[in-house]
Image (cartoon, helix red, strand yellow):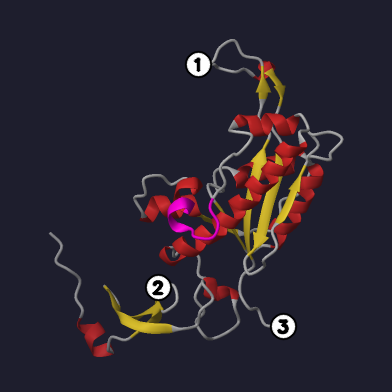
Amino acid sequence: MSQNQGPKVLFCDIETAPILAYVWGLWDENVGLNQIKSDWYVLSWSAKWLGDSKVIYRDLRNSKSLENDKPLLEEIWKLLDEADIVVWQNGKNFDHKKLNARFVLNGMQPPSSYKQIDTLQIAKKHFGFTSNKLEYMSSKLCTKYKKQVHRKFAGFLLWSECLKGNKKAWNEMEKYNKYDVLSLEELYSKLIPWDNSINFNVYTDSVNTVCKCGSKDFKRNGFDYMSTGKFQRYKCINCGHETKSRENTMSKEKRKSLRPGTVR
């Protein structure tokens, strides 16, 4: 039997086509369903496995019908189905739900369940950055990969030109989408020591504690005192992530002597 070496972590980002609709104004427009000319769909996606240098990218540039995104969906479905943990920026509210919507609309079953890590939610919970956008955080924290800004096709122009079949626009979309994943992975490595939402050790058969950064080197770091006892803390030497022992080091005599606080 092969030993489980840890979770399969997938970094993912999708780009969607805009909803095209008939409107009468630019501000406070309440668009009805009968004003929609064409609905949104997945235009492209990029993904990367943790520990693998290859970035996987797919788009609709060669599709006979741009609105037929099922071939893209089938490929990203397979990756999600294989993943134990999926990491994305604002993915819990956007990418995850958008993909699920397109899956069910295309008659597809849900992929196998996976845990989610959202760098936007980590940023909101633990930090007070000027902005929690990937562009800002990667510009400040990442040294190798930073989120790309639009070059020749600024803002919405990139999407509109891709819809027209502009090859140069599609090339820029590919680079833009890939760098979203590369900068996301680097940002994740900076933020993950602060996050305790997932215990990575349950994904390995090893009895040795393995940090989410992959290191096995820890040092004792004082104790965590709780109402029920005293627990040894450990800090990862590589990334600084803190973990603690489940063994209560407080003596039985001391535990027996503990009394609840006075209630008034």
The answer to whether residue 49 is above or below residue 259 is above
Q: Viewer-proximal residue, 253 or 113? A: 113
Q: Amino acid at mark 3?
A: Ser
Q: Quadrant of residue 61?
A: top right
Badge 1 crowding class, 10 Å Cα cut-off, few under 14, some 14 to 19, many 20 or more, is few
| Residue at the spot 76% in from the left edge and 33% down from the top edge | 166
Residue that numbered label 1 is attached to: 27
Q: Amino acid at mark 2?
A: Gly
Q: Viewer-proximal residue, 33 or 218? A: 218
Q: Position of residue 221 (x, y in %)?
A: 32, 80
* Mark closest to the chain's N terminus, 2 or 3: 3
State left or right for residue 47 relative to residue 202. right
Badge 3 crowding class, 10 Å Cα cut-off, few under 14, some 14 to 19, many 20 or more, is few
Residue that numbered label 3 is attached to: 2
Is 154 included in the stretch rendered in magenta? Answer: no
| Residue at the spot 72% in from the left edge and 58% down from the top edge | 79
The answer to whether residue 29 is above or below residue 194 is above
Is 145 included in the stretch rendered in magenta? Answer: yes
Which dot marks residue 240? 2
Q: Residues under labels 3 and 1: Cα distance?
A: 60 Å
Q: Position of residue 136 (x, y in %)?
A: 45, 47
Q: Which residues are magenta?
A: 138-146
Q: Amino acid at mark 1?
A: Trp
Q: Position of residue 75 (x, y in %)?
A: 77, 52
Q: Position of residue 154 (x, y in %)?
A: 59, 33
| Residue at the spot 21% in from the left edge and 79% down from the top edge | 258
Q: Viewer-proximal residue, 237 or 101? A: 237
Is residue 135 visible to the viewer in this orientation of the structure? yes
